[in-house]
Amino acid sequence: MSDKTFDAVVIGSGLGGLTAGALLANAGYSVCLLERNFSIGGAASVYKVGDLWVEASLHQTSDARNPRDVKHHILSQLGILDEIEWRPTGPLYKAQGGPLGEPFELPVGFEAAHDALAGRFPDKSAAIKRFLGEVEQIHDSLWTMKQAREEGSLAKFSRGLWEVQPAADGWMNSLDEIFTRDFAGAEGLKAALGANLLYYGDDPRKLWWIYYALAQGGYIASGGAYIKGGSRQLSLKLAKCITRTGGQVRMGRLVTQIETDADGAAIAIRHVARRAGDNEERIAARVVMANCAPSVAASLMAAPARAKMDEAFASRPLSTSLFSANFGLSAKPATVGVDDFLTITMPSSMKRFDQYGDGATAMAGMPGKELPLHAVSNFTAVDSGLWDEPPILLSVLGLDRLDNWTGLSKEEVVSRREAWLDAIQARLERDYPGFSGLVSSRMLLNAFSMSSYLNTPEGAVYGFAPLPPDEPILMGFPRTPATPIGGLYLASAFGGEHGFNGAMLSGAEAARLATRRLEGITAG
């Protein structure tokens, strides 16, 4: 067994871990990242099944080229913003069905969004304007305060405090409560404003209003984008930020222990070759960045530290999981009329927007007469750089839960997967005649797939559920990368907000906290 020493060890190569590692390396610290899989990126990766390239998770993100996008400052600081090709996806989405009925496209930009919504719901024009103004102000004010903290600018911080009043007023509210306040009874309008909720949550009755304002505000302000070459391009660029400074990114290494000292602080990592379970190494570390769930990190520690982690995190509800049906096609989807990048269809049984998450239990049984809420991603609506030739990917995404698949035999799982693939394909054939004739391959990833691949409890793809906080705004954001273990930080969606942007923000905040500790150690 060999011993090595690094300033920071990162466990896992998801976006949060890569972001934290890249920022620490960029600040001059020695970094070693360990990944149990044999490719980097976690959910931000592209992999091949047979001849078909599959995008693991990213269907759309807010465009990082907008200076007020949450990724802009991080990627600019690392010098890689312009090394990535961002492909605008046009309107944020086309939504249809449920309480909305006929198709509606939500355009980019707050003014354009207001005009489109007011055109569809003219009696709510004034309320829509007030609502979007509030979303924009929350998005901008919290961005201003974040910049003020990073720059140490009292003027910016004061401006942010002045602008943040809408956030303070609704700080402890759910999205459903705000929607009811502004649009009571206008269920179609609510659906038009929140059709893409599955990209960061599931239940508007429990979803934190501020999180919606930040996430949806970012989309409306910046527009949606897909990364040419797939999300793996961002992961590779972040990994290069670590290695170009002399850091290490090692794949196929399974962490078996996080060591703590007499004071309970993290001091070292033990890891082995994942396949053989041999070649153990020990790395001494001044800080440890856990790009994983707190329960996974806790399982790697001795009983006293594990108990502290459980006390801090075990009672927190988990986010939703997802299914993804992936079809390999012999021609581009546009040949059968699939033209939009993102189309979200709500079932006719969904009469109210607060029923959004009801379909999460659908896969507990065989398909019924209609599909639950689902989103169709057509990657060839942009120059994706991956599917110029067959087989061409088309993905269908929806809500799922691990409980839907527990207690089944292998044969029952296979049978149910095939039944759902049949049902999804039949719906696409109905909506786009000729679709089935293009299908050359197909596969269904479910909540169990998410749990296995991402090593996340219950297949929770967005970390902890984005619930409203119990404390007022003066107490700060309710989730933080800090843990009760000294020197251990959560560089994942579990340490902050959710989704693609949330994981990167959590990684950046984890790196900021780790830097403060490293500077303190050096000064001491």
Image (cartoon, rainbow, N blue to C red):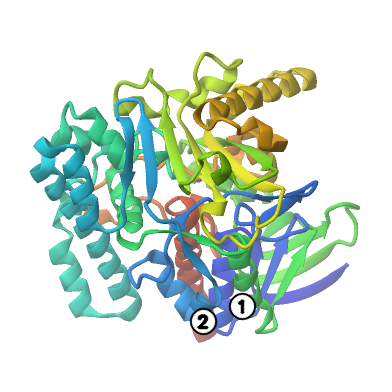
Residue under label 1, please give it: 241
**Residue type at the position of mark 2:** Gly
- Is 343 situated above or below 495? above
Which secondary structure lies at badge 2?
A: loop
Q: Quadrant of residue 477?
A: bottom left
Q: Residue 22: horizontal and vertical position, in percent?
A: 58, 74
Residue 253, how many percent across, how many down? 79, 59
Seen at 26% across and 69% down, the residue is 144
In the displayed structure, would residue 482 be above or below residue 250? above
Quote the CA–CA distance across marks 2 and 1: 9 Å
Task: Answer whether labels 2 and 1 touch (C-beta < 8 Å).
Answer: yes
What is the number of the mark on residue 380? Answer: none
Q: Residues within 10 Å of mark 1 (few under 14, many from 20)?
A: many
- Report the label total: 2
Is 220 in front, or is 217?
220
State whether residue 76 appears in this view: yes
Q: Which of the 4 quarters of the picture holds residue 413?
A: top right
Bin the neighbour count of mark 2 within 10 Å (Cα to Cα): few under 14, some 14-19, many 20 and up.
Answer: few
Horizontal arrangement in the rendering, residue 46 relative to residue 101 (left or right): right
User: Does residue 487 appear left or right of residue 407 in this picture?
Assistant: left
Precedes in sequence: disc 2 or disc 1: 2
Q: Amino acid at mark 1?
A: Cys
The reply to whether residue 299 is visible in this rendering is no
State left or right for residue 395 relative to residue 193. Answer: right
**Quadrant that contains the N terminus:** bottom right
Residue linked to disc 2? 79
Camera-nearest residue between 464 and 228: 228
Q: Residue at x 46, y 36 (%)?
A: 317
Q: Position of residue 340 (x, y in %)?
A: 46, 47
Q: Residue at x 30, y 30 (%)?
A: 100
